[in-house]
Amino acid sequence: MLSRPMLTVHEVADLLKMKETTVRGWINDGSLRAVKFGRDWRVAQKDLEAFVEARTNRPTDESG
């Protein structure tokens, strides 16, 4: 089963300080991976983290 609850479009928008329409656009164009339950979309936290990481301008410094 799911180890963490999935996020709603509203929650993702809140976390990123973006509009819900922007998040829905990312979902619709395939940029942000999401699952549709009825009329609502849900985003796994790991998918949101991967989405953000893929758009960073520098790789993370893993040396500490």
Image (cartoon, helix red, strand yellow):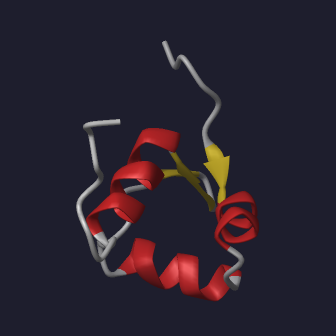
Say which residue appears at 65% left-offset and 62% top-offset.
Answer: 12
Task: Give the residue drawn at x 47%, y 85%.
Answer: 25
Q: How many marks?
A: 0
- Residue 8 on image: x %, y %: 68, 54
Residues 63 and 17: in front is: 63
x and y, in percent, of residue 63 in the image? 26, 37
Residue 3 placement (x, y as % from top left): 54, 17
Reply above or below: 38 against 6: below
13 relative position to 25: left or right: right
- In the image, is 9 to the left or to the right of 41? right
Residue at image location 63% in from the left, 87% down from the top: 21
User: Toward which corner of the image does residue 14 lie, by quadrant?
Assistant: bottom right
Q: Is residue 60 above or below residue 17?
A: above
Q: Residue furthest front?
A: 64
Residue drawn at (27%, 65%) of the image: 54
Left or right? Give the position of 64 relative to 8.
left
